[in-house]
Image: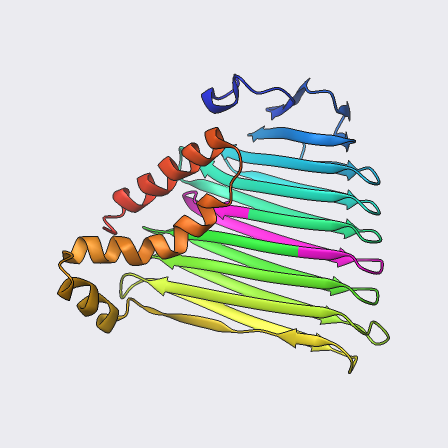
Amino acid sequence: MKVPNYLEAKDNVILFQGNTVTNHSKQKVTGTEVLLDGSGTVFLYLEDYSQNEIHIKVSEHSQIELYMIYKSSKPCAYDIHFQVNSFAVLNIFSATRNIEVTTLDIHRTFHLGSQAVLNSTKALINMGTTSLVDEVHLDSELAQANLDLLNIGAYNDVFTVKQDVYHNAKSTLSNITNSLISHANAVLDYSVSGRIFKGNEFSSCKQQNKGIILDEAGVIQVLPKLYIDEYNVEASHGAAIGQMDEEQMYYLQSRGLTESEARSLIISGYTKPFVSAIQDEDIKQMIERQILKRINEANII
């Protein structure tokens, strides 16, 4: 196995491949434990890694930009535990991509300390059957988590996603935004929960789920849930799922766009804001190519 082209020129690359771990970074890696310390960018590449449990710890006051790329050619399962300590900031971008139709199971657990910040951006653009569980624990005051996810499904893809945020302290903040696209026989099944426990006042828990179904056989199911046991909090959720708006299509075509161009423009409203938020240009170009490949393969546009 080798480093993919878009990572070859990078410093601070950690490779989890097969049954081996190779550390080309300045960060400390001991077995399946990774300690992220200081500030800077780290690239973590997982390819058919056989040891499913990984522990990632972010030191206090650290500011880390972490890129995690999952690539699988066979069924894989990952159980990844993050500890983001007090006053640390973890900006994590992760993408699932593969070259075979296979099964991928990812379970991520995050624990955040006092005034820790998690900004998670995730792209589910792989083929096959995918299960993702994101469990976020805001354990101390002023901890905050922002989760932004893009999911494109086509053919017979099945995505089962569960997102749970636990407000375990006062004055904690969470935002979840899911942008979902289903075509052909793809099934996208989401359960999104926010929990504010009694005594944890001044907390804010918000969810936004939007989805577009491009084929009558496509399925998007979103079940947003809030469990609120405290009065002095802010909480909201919503799900807007539907097929492509005929009036919007008509308006765009009346302005000179072809049907294909109009569909492409509407779809780009889901994908472009997500892609533009990626800071690393090589990763951004790789994700743009992968999104376009998935869309073209499914004849979405």
In this picture, residue 258 sits left or right of residue 11: left
Q: Residue at x 47, y 52 (%)?
A: 150
State which quadrant residue 91 falls in.
top right
Q: Residue at x 78, y 56 (%)?
A: 143
Give above or below for 199 relative to 149: below
Front-most of residues 139 and 184 = 139
In this picture, residue 184 sits left or right of residue 131: left
Q: Is residue 212 magenta?
A: no
Q: Position of residue 9 (x, y in %)?
A: 53, 17
Q: Position of residue 71 (x, y in %)?
A: 50, 33
Res 278 seen here: yes
Q: Residue at x 47, y 49 (%)?
A: 274
In this picture, residue 223 sits left or right of residue 261: right
Q: Residue at x 86, y 75 (%)?
A: 199
State which quadrant residue 60 falls in.
top right
In this picture, residue 262 sits left or right of residue 134: left
Give above or below for 175 relative to 46: below
Front-most of residues 52 and 272 = 272
State which quadrant residue 133 falls in.
bottom right
Q: Quick one: which residue is furthest to the bottom in this view?
A: 231
Q: Quick one: which residue is furthest to the front in this view?
A: 255
Res 30 seen here: no
In magenta, the rendered stretch is: 122-145
Q: Position of residue 85 (x, y in %)?
A: 82, 45
